[in-house]
Amino acid sequence: MGGRVSSVAVPRAVARPRFGAVLLLALPVLGLLLFFVHPLLTVLWRSVTDAQGALTLANYARLFDDPGLPRAAVHSVAIGLATTLTTLAFGLCLAMALHRSHMPGKRLVRAALLLPMLAPSLVLGLGLVCLLGRNGLLHRLTGIPTDIYGFWGLLLANTLYGLPQVVMIVSAALERTPARHYDAAASMGATPWRQFVDVTMPRLRFALLAAAFLVFTETLTDFGSAVVVGGSYRVLAMEIYSKVVGQLDFAMGATLGVVLLVPALFSVWLGRLARRRQDNGDASPGRALVPSRHAMRDKLLGIVSIAAVLPIVAVVGTVAYVSFVKLWPYNRTLTLANYTGGMPDGFGPVATSLWVSLLAAVVGVVMVFALSAGLRRAPPALARPLQVLAAFPAAVPGMVLGLGYVLTFNHGALSAWFYGSAAIVAACSLYHYHAQAFLTMQTGMRQVPDALEDAVASFGGDTRHVLRDAVLPFAMPALVSSFFYLFMRSMVTLSGVIFLVTPDLGLASVAVMRLDENGFLAQAAAYAMCVVVAGALALAAMRFLLHVLKDRRHVA
Amino acid sequence: MHLRIDDIAKAWGGHTVLDSVSFNAGESDFVCLLGPSGCGKTTLLRIVAGLTAPDRGRVVLDGRDITTLPARDRRMGLVFQSYSLFPDMTAAANIGYPMRVRGEAAASIPAQAAAWLERVGLGSLGERFPDQLSGGQQQRVALARALAANPSMLLLDEPLSALDPSIRGQLRGEIRALQRSLGIPTIMVTHDQDEALAMADTIVCMNQGRIEQIGSPRCLYERPRTRFVAAFIGHANLLSTGLVRDALPAFLERRPPGRDETYDLCLRPEDLLVDADPRGEGVIEDITFLGNVARADIAWRGRRLLAELPGRSPLVRGEAVSIDAVRGAWVGA
């Protein structure tokens, strides 16, 4: 290719219509303020005021009255660190196995890694209990006494849950490393091990760091596994739940929420720093990397992969099996009854979950599209703070946001129709997962060539034309991805919505938890499988749509 | 049509991009904004297009101040370096786009688009999508699209930079011919001096946000006013006044008055007279045969000169030569 690019990197056009940008930004920003900032501030405020509304730090002092709370904090951090370590170790091996080995069965490994993303985190816990609990399958079949409740159960459940995300982040970094770096190293006489140390690892540093912070935050704030397999090993998320739901002590719940928010915020901030320093690879990736043959390496990675993937398949498989069992664990006759009538509320909670998720995804995708499109044209002084705001929900644990919704919307103007409605659950899911949907959309928007937007403007087009003719064709894949991301996350979320469900508004993930609490494991498993199947269908639909788009898209 | 750029200034975040820039473009003129990366030429074009607002100064088209007029109301045809075609529209639909946006009768658009396709030599490719066209074909579509809306001016932002050299040369000629036949005033941004020399009626040579010199290609080549213009357009052997006084005193006659450092003498490689001379002060360090010409690196009085000699020159490496020049131009800072 001839020619240099002569233009310097100057900020984008200023003379473009501002009115359109303001209009595009207004609604999503209003949504963020009303349904994210406001509830969050309410939680903060509640934690520093007493019953009369006077400012006080007494709530924080009370944290130490109950010896259980500091212990729960220690537990949370311990389980967070342990999970991060195991997840990173296995995740790195899996990613290497998938991208740098000749291990057979890569497709199966990839498919198995999808499972934890399709299910609420408590489904993994549920599967573990059914498999390794005191009355679990293993005990029933072999007579070996098993007990999974506590630290080890939590560690296992959280590791299985975090694993796919680590594999994804590390894989992306591996894919960005061009083959010629390995060619160069090999030509200078580097052994495969040296190549791993000198070429692979330096490029994975920041990916591993980002993955570590992600897993740590998720484990710290996860509620689903904790409630199912935590047992007497109490963590902070459990404490918030019992303070709010058990003792109706909202002030303490809010205070604990803030305590949980601080490390999560810190961790997300560090993770973002790490990602910003990430090596984005070369502009031209060049020849695709074909790993050399190395029997020893492939065998080792294969064994580790099986060790990592087998529990996932076993756990989800157990849930599937249990969902077809008459009365777990006492009568293991196979039956369809759990699906055809055994579920206490029929398919109602599943339908509600679908409806809520659809609502969150439709509204969410419109919001993040408008926001990203508006930010393209906003002056930097406005765009930067809004970008931070839009990505901020990543740092806020679902339980804290949910608690904020309870404290904010159970009274006031909106409460009459909003509180207890499907809309509030959808809003909570949407703003809980706003960050990732927004970042996906923004990445998609970056594909839109500036020249195309300028061309529309110079031909007499207005904001409408720019969005339809220049932005949408390029942003469509991101639109599809964001939609299904929001849909799938809303289907499986538990921590955000646990405080918002009412007897009239059952959600599938909450139903799983309640049935599990009451010992109806087979019915719980049936609901769980409905969610998994819905998630799998959504994922298949997304892949199909993206494939069709890729075929139909004519992008030069 | 007459465009006047009047004292335009623009800064981004404290960094001056354009500093008091003024020039005129007349009826059916082809003006090239030429300069290195970051000299402000693209920003200037965007200001003319209405895509960027200047901090100061005016843009006047036919006596009407259009400085604050939005891009969509200026009716200017724009062609960008690349990636400016709608990916999901056919070539014909792309060309019809400005007409559709401006609300022309839908029935007449396909015929007009077809006529434009014919005009840019793509008559049979109207149903292709941009990704089914070569880079050169895409830029032809972009050109047709820019012209299809009957614009008051044509603005080209490095339209050939992303293309292969062979296609670039061909498209140069086509753009120029089309522009002449339409008589449309045109401004093209380029960093490629060959392109500017080959295409422009008038070159506006820019450097660091300022205009260095405005003139015809020939004027800029033969009579550069500044060292920058001399060095940027073609190759220049710049000799200090002191050196000229010692070695080529005849040239002092035409030197403008001023201190020694103020002016240098610019000698183009083809203006040097190089003759074999055992007592000469120059030595041929290297000579490259290029067919019709030979290019010689000459060490002379402690510096190097580049000279262009006839291809059949008998001079060889290491040979002693005497140096003189047929013409030269004094250039300032």
Image: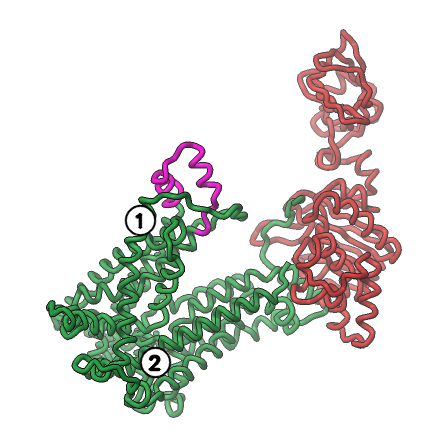
Q: Residue at x 36, y 84 (%)?
A: A350
What shade has chain B been given?
Answer: red
Res A299 label: 1
Identify the secondary structure beneath mark 2.
Answer: helix
| Residue range (magenta) | A175-202
Residue, disc 2: A405
Residue A190 part of the magenta-drawn span:
yes
Q: Main secondary structure of the magenta part?
A: helix
Is residue B292 among the parts visible in the rendering?
Answer: yes
Amino acid under disc 2: Tyr
Where residue B93 appears, x then y in whole percent? 73, 68
Query: Residue B178 vs residue B161: left or right?
Result: right
Identify the secondary structure beneath mark 1.
Answer: helix
What shade has chain A been given?
Answer: green
Q: CA distance from mark 1 to mark 2?
A: 51 Å
Where residue B271 appears, x then y in whole percent? 81, 25
